[in-house]
Amino acid sequence: MTALASSASPASNAKRTNLLGLSRDQMEAFFVSIGEKKFRATQMMKWIHHEGCDNFDAMTNLSKPLRTRLAEVAEIQGPSVVYEGASKDGTRKWVLEVEGGSYVETVLIPSENGSRRTLCVSSQVGCTLDCSFCSTGKQGFQRNLTAAEIIGQVWVASRSAGPRKDGISRPVTNVVMMGMGEPLLNYDNVVPAMKLMLDDTAYGLSKRRVTLSTSGVVPMIDKLGDELDVSLAISLHAANDELRNELVPLNRKYNIRALLDACQRYLAKGAERRVVTIEYTLIKDVNDQQAHAEQLAALLKELPCKINLIPFNPFPHSGYETPSRNQAMRFQQWLYDLGYTAPIRMTRGDDIDAACGQLVGRVKDKTRRHERYIQSIQIDAD
Ligand code: SAH
Ligand code: SF4
């Protein structure tokens, strides 16, 4: 709180506090720090997150002197949109430039019947974990996103539909932390952002509709369970340690048993009857055989869960291939025979390179990277 108070100081040249990423508690602390009442936090959050407003002058229920003061000590700084595209299947994608010249991508994926619009949100630029089948991992790690940059993705996507009005459907109905990065390795920024997703004065999504996906940072799963009760997805991809060590190197630190135990503890803390989502990327001849399906079913016997099968999304030089559709369906059938109904999650937004696991900043060198980046994605979007 001290940090907030000092950054909110009106001293000239002091860095302004970016209100976009503040959770309710932090927003209240900010207003108290500038000598205002706590309830201002609710007003401000509604302006920012319901109305998509980033201009204090437009906040007509705040007095003129307060608006002037806010302009001195604070700002509402969203990520800047450098590209916005829509694919034939209705998927929309934004490329956002964040401080320091990095890019992150966020994708809004409509369900077949249009009732759900799921936003896939990034938590880091790149990733440290280097899973062998993931293009983000291959890109290396640049930095953690701030809370403002994380919630900024929801803000940009929601804002594109105009101010929220009661009775009108929400532009974003679900959020999955499945974009770039490992959210549990950026815990301190991810948690305030997720709190905003759930908060009624921000996005008001139910905790079932907000999912954190992790490759298995066991101690942080426990920590998350103490603080939030969002849906949990686990990137499992292999049902034995030998294979998982190869695909998800983090498994050498936290093996499958430790991970599944953490899932059980997480579920036990939740208020309602919940299940964990198990993500299983199907890779040709690597983890798509009958023995793998049998191992997977045996492994998950004790865990309340549902399995999502995701055909591997190829990228250059990955060394892996996507199984045929028939093979994916065979794998699904083997699981079905063993008592699991596992949907095959279809790749969406392929024509704008927005499919899961494809959220990669393509241009790694700093040379003209902005320009070349825009060119490359515009070609994809054609
Ligand atoms: N770091 C987190 C969340 C981001 S990755 C995690 O690993 O869970 C989101 C999902 O996409 C994960 O399940 C990941 O395993 C999967 N994924 C990554 N690369 C993929 C690819 N090339 N094809 C299919 N799925 C992929
Ligand atoms: Fe990181 Fe997830 Fe990709 Fe693994 S799959 S490298 S944890 S983003």
Image (spheres, rainbow, N blue to C red):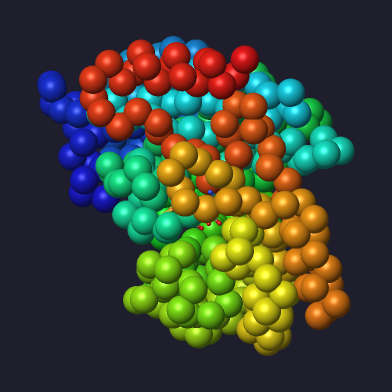
In the image, 327 versus 219, the foreground residue is 327
Location of residue 16 (image quadrant): top left
The C terminus sits in image quarter: top right
In the image, 326: left or right of 195? right
In the image, 16: left or right of 318? left
In the image, 146 versus 315, the foreground residue is 315
Location of residue 267 (image quadrant): bottom right
Decide if residue 216 is in sight here: yes
Task: Name the residue at 86% across, 38% down.
Answer: 113
Residue 276 placement (x, y as % from top left): 64, 69
In the image, 273: left or right of 56? right
In the image, 348 versus 293, the foreground residue is 293
Residue 287 placement (x, y as % from top left): 60, 67
Task: Name the residue at 43% across, 16% down.
Answer: 374
Q: Is residue 373 above or below residue 305?
A: above
In the image, 293 versus 357, the foreground residue is 293
Task: Name the residue at 74% across, 23% down.
Answer: 88
Task: Name the residue at 81% across, 80% down.
Answer: 338
Location of residue 245 (image quadrant): bottom left
Residue 342 placement (x, y as % from top left): 77, 64
Indicate the quadrant of ligand 2 in the picture: bottom left
